[in-house]
Amino acid sequence: MIKILHLSDIHLGSTTHGQINPQTGLNTRLEDFTKALTTCIDRAISEPADLVLFGGDAFPDATPAPVVQQLFATQFRRLADAQIPTVLLVGNHDQHSQGQGGASLAIYRSLAVPGFVVGDRLETHRLTTKAGDVQVITLPWLTRSALLTRGDTDGLSMAEVGSLLIEKLKVVLEGEIRQLDPEIPTVLLAHVMVDRATYGAERFLAAGKGFTIPLNLLCREEFDYVALGHVHRHQVLFENPLVVYPGSIERVDFGEEKEDKGYCWLEVSKGKTKFEFCALKTRPFRTVKIDVTAEEHPEASILAKLAGVDLTEAIARLIYIVKPEQIGQIDHQVLHQAMNKAHNYAIIPEVVNPINRVRLPELNRGEILDPISALKAYLSGRADLKIYEEDLVLATQALLEGTSLEISEKISSQPLDSRSLDRSQTQLTIQL
């Protein structure tokens, strides 16, 4: 059995909701992410693991600050010192904005770190571990330009381009599979957005820069495990073979407030895989939300609500809904005193707007839409823009793809109602 530690989406360098630690001079969130990474590497060395697979997105962007690179390198160097082979996959955040190269991880290839493989292209790596050989197919974050030329897509609709992309990927992946040694365990390591996954902010952040992979493309009997990266929520998409997102190792924002963070521990042999998700102890996020519009004493109601929540060393936010005439009844200094046990916090008053706002009742609470879906949902409630809907969607798709689009005669020649040009009339507030 080959023991494997599978982690992903480290995002080292994310400093949102942090503050400067006066003792170290570092942002406290950078320290939180480093602590989580250190715990993962500790497990790999103490067990020990025979192989470490990193599923991509080492940093928030492709050009991290030197101190962040140093912290990352310090931990992964420990694996090299322990002679544990490691595969570093290139994710979307590891690439330049043009989608070229794995800038933030390329140095590991340049330095020829012993036992380290940088997966910045679709290819198969045969690795020798202390427990035997293993084949790892690396599938980094792919953009449309990685598989198609502009000539390939001339005259095609967005749906047709998507289908062509999948067909191209099927052919290339099949070529790798046919070269596998059937006697050796095989792992597919992929930084992808799978159609059956439960998404969070990843879908919005990657919109227009990649494409969605059908799950059935990954569920091949030749694979003993499919190690995924990109989606921050841990989830098992399929069981034979196991297709798994370990999720991120720390919370990036409040959208991940209720998610467990951790890594996966595996024991893999040909035709058999034992799997365990290992949760990490991370800094909690806490949201306290209260509607006091019907309360006679709104401040007292807010304080009572806060008293029932443990905010100690948490990243917290207080959201309270009030009527305009109640604002003077609430002392913000008192609220700050009640929140100061948190590591970091925000106080967010939401004043009820007497003017009716656009509502989209078909949205689920907390749902995050990609830009195209959000635009379509908005346009569904705008009868005055119905005639322009198709053109607006096409123009938005072209904008996300970074391609040019000729505006149709309909939208360029049709006179616009003055109300349609009024910015105040076209703003959207989604109430969830």
Image (cartoon, rainbow, N blue to C red):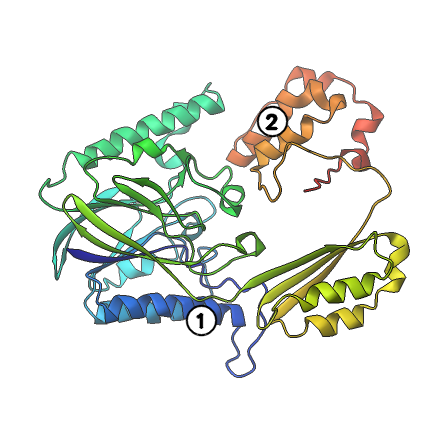
Numbered label attached to residue 393:
2
Task: Say left or right for 195 vs 120.
Answer: right
Find the distance from the CA under tag 1 to the CA under tag 2: 42 Å
* x and y percentages locating residue 96 in the rendered image: 44, 49
* Quarter of the figure with residue 131: bottom left
Amino acid at circle 1? Val
Judging from the image, what secondary structure is the residue with disc 2 in?
helix
* x and y percentages locating residue 353 in the rendered image: 83, 45
Looking at the picture, does residue 131 appear above or below residue 422? below
Numbered label attached to residue 67:
1
Nearer to me, 265 or 169: 265
Looking at the picture, does residue 23 appear above or below residue 206? below
Can residue 97 be seen from the camera position used here?
yes
Residue at 75% x, 17% y is 414
Amino acid at circle 2? Val
Task: Say left or right for 243 vs 80.
Answer: right
* Quarter of the figure with residue 419: top right
Mark 2 is surrounded, within 10 Å at the Cα level, by few (under 14), some (14 to 19) or many (20 or more) other residues, namely: some
Residue at 52% x, 54% y is 256
Rendered-image quadrant of the C terminus: top right
Residue at 51% x, 67% y is 283
* x and y percentages locating residue 98 in the rendered image: 46, 44
